[in-house]
Structures are given as C-alpha cells and as structure tokens.
Image (tube, rainbow, N blue to C red):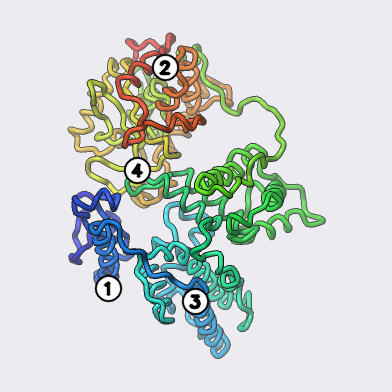
Amino acid sequence: MARGQNRKKKVPGTRVLLDGTYEAILVVPADCQDRVGKKNLTRRLGTTLYSDAKRLAPPILREFELVVERARAGASAPAEPVDPRKAVRAIEQWRAAELSRAELRAFNQPDEEIPDPQTYWSEHSAYRLRYYELRDGLSRQGRWADIAGFDEKLLGVLDDQGIRLSGTHPAMTRLRPIFQAAWCDVVKYEDDLRSGAVTPGETSNAAVAQSVSTASQFSDHNLEGTVWDAFVAWRTKRERDGGDAGKTAREFETQVKRFIDVHGDLRLGQITRRHCIEFRNLMAQYPASVPTAMRSESVRTVVARYTAKGQAPYKRLAAKTLNEKVFAALRAVFADAAIESENFVNPMLNISVETTKSAPTKLPYNDREVGALFASDVFRGKLVRDKRAGGDAQKWIPLLAAYSGARLEELGQLAVTDIKEEDGVHYMHIQERYDGPDPGYLRSLKNEASQRKVPIHSALLELGFLQFVDAQRSAGNIHVFSSLKWDDKKKRDKSYKVTASLSKWWSAYSRLVVPDTRKSFHSFRHTFKNRLRNAGVAKALDDALTGHISSDEGDRYGRDQEGLGFRLPILADAIEQLSHPNIDVRAIR
C-alpha cells in the first residue's frame, strides 16, 4: 500500500496514512484528469477514529464527485452569484453567537467550574491546536483549511442564513480567510476568558466586523483581489502535482501576513507607496528574535515594546534579511499580480533599506581545500563512528555536492527511485513526490526551480555510486541514505531536515581541514557554480543544474511539462565541463 498499512476498519472512500489518520480519496477518471489537473483528489480528515472518519468522509467525497462532474461537463455554467455583504454578515453572526456562548458560561459559572475549552468545545479543539501551532511557529506545513470539516462548517454557517453554495463555488476562495479570521477570534476569546485576560463583555479583535465594512471589495466588478488573494494566486501558480512551492512559499506567507497585520488585507488597488514605506520603516525596527510569548502580538505592538523609552538596545533584523526576504517576498507576490492586471503597478518596487557592503558570508572552497577535504580519512575508507555522520552518507553526500552543486537537504532526501536513466544519461531526479513506495515523509524543496534532473558526473560513476544505490535498493531501503536520522514523529513536517545532524557533523569535521568559518557544506555549491562559470558554461545551463530561478523572463519559456528547459544530454555535456583537479578519484575508498 502506497501511503501506509491499513490496519483499521475500512471507511469507504478513504485510506489510512502511515501516521494512522484517515484520508478521503477519489481516483479521478482518466478522461477528466487533464481538466482536474490531478490523478487523485485527497484531503486529510485529521482523525484516527473510525466513527469520525465515517462522518467526515461522505460530504468531502461529494465535493470531489462534483469536481469530476464539472470537469466531465467541460465548460460549466457560471455559478450563482453570492451577495458578499450577506455572506460576510452570516459569518459575523456566527462569530458573535460563539462569543456570546463563551461569555454566558464564563459570567454565570464559578471559575473552577468552567471546563477546559479544549475538552468542552470539541468542535473548536482541532482548530485551537492548529491556531496555536501556527501562532507559535510549531507547524510549518498545515494551513487552517487543512482541518477536517473546515469547509463543511463554513457551508453550514452560510446555509443557516439561507446562503446555499457548494464547496467549489468561486466565492469560497474569498470566504475562507474571512471565516478563518472569525474562528481565530472565537478561539482567542475563549482562551482569554479562561486565563482572565478579559472579562465577559470585552470582545476580542473584530476581524470579521472589519471585513463587513469592506465587503464591497469582493463584488464581481472588482477583479484585483486583496493582498492575501495575490499570495494565494502566487502559490497556486507554482504548485506542482499537489505539492507546494516549498520553503519559499512558507517564508513568503510569513511576510504577507506581516504586511496584512500592519495594514489589513487591502485590495490591491488600495495599496499605495506610503503603505509600503510605512511597512519598511516598521520592519526596520523589528527585532531579529521575538520571544515565544510575544509571537502572537502585532508587528506594531512588538516594535512599540522594543523601542519604548528605557528599553535596552536590541538586535534588529539585518538589512540583508529585510531586502532579500521580507521585501523581496512582497515584491514577488505583487509582481505576479501586476502581470494579471493592467491597472496595478507593483508598489514594492525599489523599497529597501540601506546596507553596508561587506564580504560574502559564505565563500567557495578553493582547489587546495577541495583536495585536502577529499584526501581526509572519511574518503580513504575510514568512516567515523558518529551517529550524526549518517554512515555512508558522510562519504557520498559531500562527493555528490562537489560534482552536482545540489543542496545538502536535496541530496539527503533522495529515494532510490530518484536515481534514473533517460536518453542514455544517468541522473538524479530532485523532486518532492515519490515515484515508488511513499514512506509518508514530506520532502521539501526551496522553490519551483528546485525540481530538476541533474546528470550524474562521470567521476561519481567511476566511484561506484550506481552500485551503492543498487545495494540500497536490494536491501529494501526506500531512501538512498537510510542511515540518516529519519524521525517518524516529524515525517509530516516539511520544515524537518533529515540532514540537520549531518550538517553539524560536517561543520566540525571540515573545520579540522578548512578552519575558515566563512566556509561550510554550502561552499560546495558555490564552488560548483564557480567551476562551471570559469569553464564557460552558459548561465541558463548553470541555473538548470543548480535549481536557481533565472532572472531572465525569456529563460522560462519553452520548458517541457516537467519545467525543464534542456534535454538531459545537453545538461550532461555541461556538467562534464566540471573538473576538480585536486581530487584524486582513484584514491577514494
């Protein structure tokens, strides 16, 4: 079974994942797969209980069936329009009722008799857990819409007010974040009542009430959308095979939420340069590290506390971080929106903070250092007995990095099925999905360009890398480097790095040979790019091999269905231009 062993009672239309939770699944008929864009429609139910799965699965499966029916019908009739004000008002009424329910109980019962909301309000328990995971930065993979029953709850709230629509209605894209805000208020207010932070009658931030006043933004006459809509469109555009844009998407989401926190979820047409300058000035004062207890606070509140009179000096976000991560994220999201709208001009253009010129924080290894590293004991048949080193990984992963330029985690995540041959070229297929048995781990790539095919250099073939992979396959291992730390408890967490321990080990081990602290495992990647550049390899080929997003828009045209712009033999010729004259391949054991 691909996703896990089903030892639980079967619920029709579901399967059991490796972590024991149920997942609804509908196989899309072959004649509809092109229109649907997927072979399977899936949604985690968020429960390990048969009774819950039996209740949650049917409405989700009906949604899936509707998607297939529409795909089979081709161009379907336009959905019935929804009055935005009426829909938002329905959500606000639900929020107010939930807050009143909490107040009545808190006001009329002694404190010691108020049950724990996590056990009493079971319908909110799953959401409460996700809310605090996201708030505290503990969850990097899930979003609020992943919670089983979220859409059902929203549809029920609307239905109570006479608004009937399906889960695939276009308006759902607009209504989900509004309902998310409402549920945030409910969860926070419940917990504030329990902790004594508020007294009955003091409602929390009325996120939905604010949405009511701006409901006109969601009319059919406005095609621009909001800041959050722009981010969702950016992320959706980059999704491949049900995956996501990897680490980049999560980083972008953080910055988009910060902008919304400062100015609200503005309609794109409302954003001015003044908004962006104010955001820049606030973030320039934002601390580099925020205590867990303050992470739920707004950007303005955090900055006000740190800059208050009498406060001690503190370390702020570096200019490089602000320019290359915070502002760059918003600039990229708005750039996509500008492409789709003739009337929208990217307001983040040229928004930055001044930075002082300094030497690169990470440098490439030079020829002498490369030679010394690969002449050390590990590459002479004397593997170290350190769990962090990952057995054979301590030998093969540095070699792969030196001859491929791949990132450390990309190499550590390789499955035996990722080592392939096509057009007479042996290559590594760096991707998120598994072609063979799926062990349930979420493999994460940095961005959309990270998914690529990298030919295996002849030096690695000479060293016996293919034979090593065959040995892992024969042993029944799913991953090439099964001796790395594969933590089953974190398999659904995309932020988990299986090479984290190996990285720490290499830092200590390599420092004995190369004491320069500006050089690390990532230096192999810099060295690789330097070698190709000096060998005269075109930048577009270099980017294709290393998984960098090209700055030239023209380079993005003419790619095949896998996003590749070059045939493998062309890439193989390019990678063979790489040489490491100081590595004695014949001496490596």
Cβ atoms at labels 4 and 1 below 8 Å apart: no
Amino acid type shown at disc 2: Phe
Identify the mark at residue 55; answer none if there is no mark: 1
Q: How dense is the environment of label 3, judged by Cα within 10 Å: few (below 14), some, or many (20 and up)?
A: some
Alpha-carbon distance for marks 3 and 2?
68 Å
Spot occupied by residue 39 in the image (x, y as percentages of width and height)? 24, 50
Image position, residue 269 (x, y; %): 60, 55
- Per the image, the residue denoted by label 2 is 374
Q: Is disc 2 in contact with disc 1, using a CB cutoff of under 8 Å?
A: no
Residues under labels 4 and 1: Cα distance?
34 Å
Whether pointer 1 and pointer 3 mark residues with C-beta atoms closer than 8 Å, the reply is: no
Q: Which SS class for mark 4?
A: loop
Q: Between disc 3 and disc 4, whose residue precedes?
A: 3
Tag 1's secondary structure? helix
Please, what is the three-letter code of the amino acid marked with disc 3?
Lys
Please name the residue that numbered disc 4 is placed on.
486
Residue depicted at x 64% and y 59%: 263
